[in-house]
């Protein structure tokens, strides 16, 4: 290990050791192994050790956790409640250990017992309770709220099965059930006493006051996991609701009458509610179960918020002084009507007064622009499942029109017999925010122009952020150590301090050390790829990475087409001094998204042909490890030289992977989309490989007839690529396999792959040129790290606290 890294690791250790010595950790660990797991050290398996270590760390979390709760209560602090259908927290063992300052004590204690910390941490399941960016953002935000001592709860669902496990069968994605709970959940506390009844269906009797007579009731039971902030000074709660199989739901009458399976129907339906996460990140409109899940989360959470408030207050009119509820997209947008329902039906408010109160409490974050991706629920479905809520929505709708006039102005909440959840969320929130500057502008202009005109100032921007604890300190120990060694500690909670690295950006010794950290990350990745996926990669190559959900708008297709072009160029001119590249892909497609699945198959087919070609083996590899998740991201992102952020401009709301890569010293090749725009401004236009049409140009180009055909005809390179695919070069057993895909590109190309292809190719040429000069590259990479501090989720959460929640830190 270079000296510069060794000293930094030693330093950070002394200050982390203060909370518990290795000897104390060892004693606590051995205790848990005996009394919690019931094993002796000699008999304990890896999983046994993991459970004992997790419980030891959870014990250490209990103190700040209970203290934080007591303090928030005693000081009567305003609380934030973050409602999200998805959370992707990643593995908790190392993260919690780092935040409590226990990581090194744990490692040393384990080493003394002949155990490896890394091996044990690696045994933990990665809770995949989300699809992608929105769920991971929720997890970064919870961690930042804890770090900033912002009193908060995260509310979500405890899906029995998270996002499917992806495997490849002859290149095709196949989905396997995921069961994170099989390995046990040593982190959560089951709260049998915290359960609420969530009601569904039935009818509303309209007398003096409407009375809802539901025809089904399902209990929601809380499972609480502590979320410890960095430094261990504050901890919040992630509260996940599970549908409780209630004994009362079992129909003994039916059973006794001989209908043995039918007797269990209500119970089966109840369990189905939190059985599985919807594996799509687009609306799955009209699905009864999805709306039921959304209401189940929302109702249990809002009931809990009100119950917690009433424990120490009487007057619900004061709710906005004590409570802020944030809706993570429209998935919990029934929160407005639910809160109004509770205030009117249970507490005697008039609906209009209740709606005013609800609006002061609620905030709505929008994560998508595409009108077709916005949630709309059929009125008939709403009536069947939530008749009282539909009544409330209809009244809100009428009142909107009364107050603001014309329904034609685009202010209706119900249109074509569907409830527009974005409009409902807007109408019941005091703030609506987009997730990057560009996205927020487009939300104002394209999504809610009429509402923006009537409520100027309601729409605000909060550009997304990521937690530097997981995405630098945990995921990239060599770089974190170099940073600490160069500028001292403290950057973990003040990421702007990375700017101090700029003073060293021209120092060859620093740049060498920076390059050395990248090499170490590549070595770690290479070992992991080899062990877990049987994939070998050359370490001296440029690692070019695109990891994210597979979507046409994210344009993994453009990336693989370019990869084919590169392969053809190398074959045509093998001696041209090609910069060796490893092209890395990772990501899942929604099971029903055929076009995305075709792209996955094409990438795998291309990988098979390219990787088997000895003529290009030194200069090009294509790898696609299956089952991309948070843990895989922690391996891939630190090792990347190049970050692919190449969506069609105007379509990616923000992106957050783009921030993680830049933080870890990867350069971005990207379009002017989402947060790329702000990243480029901050890291410097010279340190970002820009290409492609702007959002405005995209709209104009789409209007041009035959745009795709003309672009392809103008690009010899692209024509050669499409020809090879159409000829079956990558599917020799079935030459026509990609006929439809190629045909779409020639004749339709909604995502403008053809329009942007040559510009992308040119930008890739600039990447090669820069990489040929290692010090130039390292300098550009180091400047990315130095200038990315703004994208800390701590900054984002501070903005939410002041601009949306009106909450101050408790410490
Ligand atoms: C809705 C209805 C029914 C079934 C599923 C859904 C659903 C589920 C998940 C719709 C959307 C999602 C997830 C969206 C998402 O992850 N959006 C991403 O959010 C990130 C955080 O703001 C942004 O960085 C990304 O740009 C955005 O794509």
Image (tube, rainbow, N blue to C red):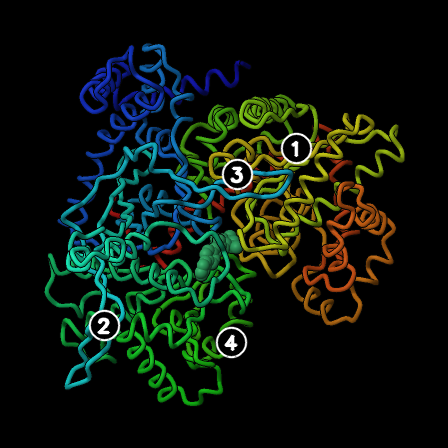
Image x and y of residue 777, in percent: 69, 33
Give the labeled residue for mark 4: 449
First in sequence, mark 3 or 4: give its number: 4
In the picture, the disc for residue 341 is 2
Identify the image quadrant of residue 624.
top right
- Real-space Cα distance between discs 2 and 1? 54 Å
- Considering only vertical position in the picture, is 82 above or below 190? below
Most distant residue in the front direction: 258
Secondary element under disc 2, as helix, strand or loop, is: helix
In the picture, the disc for residue 627 is 3
- Real-space Cα distance between discs 3 and 2? 42 Å
What residue is shown at x 58% (from left), y 23% (from top)?
Answer: 530
Residue 143 vs residue 42, the one in the foreground: 42
| Dot in front, 3 or 4 | 3
| Dot in front, 3 or 2 | 3
What residue is shown at x 26% (from left), y 38% (from top)?
Answer: 188
First in sequence, mark 3 or 1: give its number: 1
Residue 356 makes an appearance in the image: yes
Residue 786 makes an appearance in the image: no
- Real-space Cα distance between discs 3 and 1? 19 Å
Mark 1 nearby-residue class (10 Å; few <14, some 14–19, many ≥20) = many
Secondary element under disc 3, as helix, strand or loop, is: loop
- Real-space Cα distance between discs 4 and 1? 43 Å
Check if mark 2's residue and mark 4's residue have beta carbons within 8 Å: no
- Mark 2, ligand 1, within 8 Å: the answer is no
């Amino acid at each position: 290990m270079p000296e510069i890294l060794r000293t930094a690791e030693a330093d950070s250790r002394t200050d982390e050791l203060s909370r518990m010595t290795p000897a104390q950790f060892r004693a606590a660990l051995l205790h848990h192994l005996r009394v919690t797991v019931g094993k002796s050290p000699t008999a304990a398996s890896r999983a046994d050790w993991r459970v004992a270590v997790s419980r030891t760390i959870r014990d250490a979390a209990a103190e700040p956790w209970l203290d934080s709760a007591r303090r928030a209560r005693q000081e009567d602090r305003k609380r934030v409640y973050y409602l999200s259908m998805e959370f992707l927290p990643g593995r908790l063992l190392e993260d919690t250990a780092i935040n409590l300052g226990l990581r090194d004590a744990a490692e040393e204690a384990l080493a003394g017992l002949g155990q490896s910390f890394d091996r044990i941490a690696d045994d933990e399941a990665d809770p995949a309770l989300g699809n992608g960016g929105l769920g991971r953002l929720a997890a970064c935000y919870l961690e930042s709220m804890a770090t900033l001592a912002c009193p908060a709860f995260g509310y979500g669902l405890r899906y029995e099965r998270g996002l499917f496990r992806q495997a490849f069968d002859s290149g095709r994605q196949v989905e396997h059930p995921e069961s994170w709970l099989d390995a046990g959940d040593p982190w959560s506390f089951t709260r049998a006493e915290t359960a609420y009844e969530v009601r569904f269906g039935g009818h509303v009797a309209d007398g003096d006051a409407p009375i809802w007579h539901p025809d089904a009731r399902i209990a929601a039971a809380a499972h609480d996991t502590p979320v410890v902030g960095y430094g261990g000074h504050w901890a919040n709660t992630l509260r996940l609701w599970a549908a409780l199989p209630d004994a009362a739901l079992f129909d003994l009458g039916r059973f006794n009458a001989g209908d043995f399976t039918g007797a269990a129907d209500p119970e089966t339906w109840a369990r189905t509610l939190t059985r599985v996460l919807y594996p799509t990140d687009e609306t799955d409109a009209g699905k009864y179960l999805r709306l039921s899940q959304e209401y189940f989360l929302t109702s249990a959470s809002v009931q809990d918020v009100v119950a917690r408030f009433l424990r120490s207050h009487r007057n619900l009119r004061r709710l906005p002084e004590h409570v802020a509820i944030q809706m993570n997209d429209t998935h919990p947008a029934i929160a407005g009507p639910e809160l109004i329902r509770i205030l009117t039906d249970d507490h005697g408010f008039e609906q209009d007064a209740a709606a005013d109160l609800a609006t002061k409490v609620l905030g709505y974050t929008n994560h998508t622009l595409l009108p077709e991706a916005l949630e709309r629920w059929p009125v008939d479905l709403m009536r069947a499942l939530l008749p009282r809520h539909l009544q409330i929505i209809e009244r809100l709708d009428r009142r909107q029109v009364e107050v603001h006039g014309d329904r034609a102005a685009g202010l209706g909440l119900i249109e074509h017999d569907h409830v527009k959840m974005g409009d409902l969320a807007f109408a019941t929130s005091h703030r609506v925010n987009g997730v990057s500057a560009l996205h927020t502008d487009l939300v104002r202009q394209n999504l809610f122009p009429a509402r923006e005109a009537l409520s100027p100032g309601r729409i605000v921007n909060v550009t997304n952020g990521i937690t530097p604890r997981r995405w630098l300190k945990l995921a990239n120990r060599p770089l974190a150590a170099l940073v600490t060694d160069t500028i001292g500690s403290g950057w973990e909670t003040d990421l702007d301090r990375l700017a101090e690295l700029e003073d060293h950006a021209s120092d060859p010794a620093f740049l060498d050390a920076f390059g050395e950290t990248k090499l170490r990350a590549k070595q770690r990745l290479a070992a992991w790829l080899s062990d877990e996926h049987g994939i070998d990669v050359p370490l001296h190559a440029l690692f070019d990475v695109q990891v994210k959900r597979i979507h046409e708008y994210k344009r993994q297709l453009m990336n693989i087409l370019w990869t084919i072009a590169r392969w053809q160029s190398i074959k045509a001119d093998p001696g041209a001094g090609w910069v060796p590249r490893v092209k890395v892909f990772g990501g899942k497609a929604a099971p029903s998204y055929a076009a995305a699945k075709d792209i996955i198959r094409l990438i795998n087919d291309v990988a098979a042909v390219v990787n088997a070609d000895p003529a290009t083996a030194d200069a090009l590899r294509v790898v696609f490890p299956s089952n991309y998740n948070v843990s895989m991201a922690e391996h891939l992102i630190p090792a990347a030289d190049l970050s692919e952020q190449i969506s069609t401009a105007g379509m990616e709301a923000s992106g957050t992977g783009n921030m993680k890569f830049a933080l870890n010293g990867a350069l971005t090749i990207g379009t002017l989309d989402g947060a790329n725009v702000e990243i480029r401004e901050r890291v410097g236009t010279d340190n970002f490989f820009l290409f492609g049409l702007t959002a405005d140009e995209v709209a104009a180009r789409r209007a041009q007839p035959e745009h795709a055909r003309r672009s392809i005809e103008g690009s010899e390179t692209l024509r050669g690529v499409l020809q090879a695919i159409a000829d079956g070069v990558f599917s020799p057993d079935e030459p026509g396999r990609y006929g439809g895909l190629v045909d779409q590109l020639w004749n339709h190309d909604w995502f403008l792959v053809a329009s942007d292809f040559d510009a992308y190719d040119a930008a890739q040429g600039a990447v090669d040129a820069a990489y040929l000069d290692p010090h130039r590259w390292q300098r550009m990479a180091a400047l990315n790290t130095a200038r990315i501090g703004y994208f800390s989720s701590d900054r984002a959460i501070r903005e939410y606290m002041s601009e949306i929640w009106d909450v101050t830190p408790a410490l």
